[in-house]
Amino acid sequence: MSFRKNQYTSLFFSSITAVTGTIWSQLGCSKNIYFHPNYLLSLEKNNPQIKFSYLVLLDSEKKPVAFASIQTIDFPLDGIENSIKQNFHLLKYFGRRLGVFPKLKPIKLMVCGNVFVSGEHGVFIKENENKHTVLKKVVKAISKETASEDISIYLIKDFIKESLNITNKLLHLNYYSFNVETNMQLILDEKWLCFDDYLAAMKTKFRVKAKRALTLSKSLVVKDNSEESIKEIIPEITKLYKTVSNKAVFNLGDFNPETYSSLKNQLGENYFLKSYEHEGKVVGFMSGIINNTSLDAHFVGIDYSLNKQKAIYQRMLYDYIEIAISKKLKTINFGRTASEIKSSVGATPQELTCYIRHKKTIKNKFIKYFLSYIETKPFKQQKPFK
């Protein structure tokens, strides 16, 4: 498709393998691992429950200036309704009556972004481009390219505060903004050359808590897994992953654990998965992605019957920190959920904003009333450092 003004053209792809090497080299977006074809291929190959598509925006000289990653899912509405204040039954009732949120049928939700990871992983725009203009062109192109599909709701996620002066332009395209649960982020001190330096920076109370967790978890056998060893423990980590994901109040999509070994194959040292064993049994795992100067906590799995006794989850958090310090990284993105315990190891909340609209104009106007009644879980922010 093309736009007369500014002469932009969009190319739409139904598989990442169809995007040519020339486009990748001209875009230069692969430095961000979430816009790397190897990462996107791993997701696409192993998660058939999601429809993946991609959009490339070309300028008047037919050179790529932007890339969008699109994931379309069948989304059950329980997650949204569980987040609505419990006493607001009338709003839910009218939502049903108007067909904004049907009773049993999952809605077709198109996500520009990554349903499995928090952060700005939906749209890449080249430097020196007019980001306001290009973003609007990308979003309009996505709408036009998917107009014939059975999509009910469009969601564009997750933007940090510094991006809002650009992304708020989406409000002029009939999108509504709302805040989701914060990403818990730890900014690493340059003076921390090893894990002991991190511990030394803590107040006594939190340092004692950390050492106690390390003592409780000392008997756990921690293994760094290769692609092959990940495949061997897929049944165990699948069960542990589901134990954790089933506790989540709001979950955009289920992750296929077969993806873990594929990510290890495609990303090499930039992806890791550690397993935790007790008496020969896998009782936990944690995974992570190294993206430039950040470590992004990926998925974890925990045997909750042993979690308190062996401090499994706390040990994982400290292991993330030790890995990041050893690799001289600048930040750790711990993601959403379990915010209070993450704050106890030094993480602070980073607000994320999403944009949403319904395909139908009348139903779209009703959505904004729902957004005002969605609430995130409050938590007590801990301050562990001196």
Image (cartoon, rainbow, N blue to C red):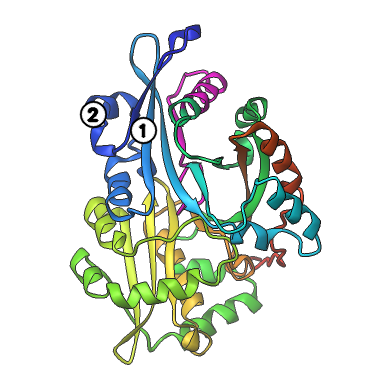
Name the residue that disc number 2 marks.
Answer: 20
Q: Is residue 156 magenta?
A: no
User: In this view of the protein, which residue sits in the foreground, 302 or 278?
Assistant: 302
Q: Please indicate, yes or no, whether residue 310 appears anywhere in the rendered image.
A: no
In the figure, residue 7 lies in which quadrant?
top left
Report if residue 136 lies within the magenta region. Answer: yes
Q: Position of residue 187 (x, y in %)?
A: 54, 54
Rendered position, 152 above or below 50: above
- Give the percent coordinates (x, y) of residue 350: 62, 51
**Disc number for residue 29:** 1
Please tell me whether mark 1 sits on a helix, a strand or a loop. Answer: loop
Position of residue 333 measured from the top left corner of the image (x, y, whole percent): 50, 55
From the viewer's perspective, is the residue at label 2 or at label 1 nearer? 2
Dividing the picture into quarters, in which one does residue 165 lie?
A: top right
Query: The disc labelled 1 sits on which kind of residue?
Result: Cys
Q: Relative to 24, is 203 on the left or the right?
A: right
Instruction: Give the residue type that dot 2 points to.
Output: Thr
The residue shown at (57%, 22%) is 132
Residue 94 lies left or right of residue 65; in this view the side is: right
Gap between marks 2 and 1 measured at Cα = 13 Å
Question: How would you rate the neighbour count of disc 1 (Cα within 10 Å): few for under 14, some for 14-19, many for 20 or more?
Answer: some
Residue closest to the eye, 369 or 227: 369
Horizontal arrangement in the rendering, residue 78 relative to residue 109 (left or right): right
Magenta range is: 113-141
Label drawn at residue 222: none
Quarter of the image with the N terminus is top left
Judged from the image, the secondary structure of the residue bearing numbered disc 2 is loop
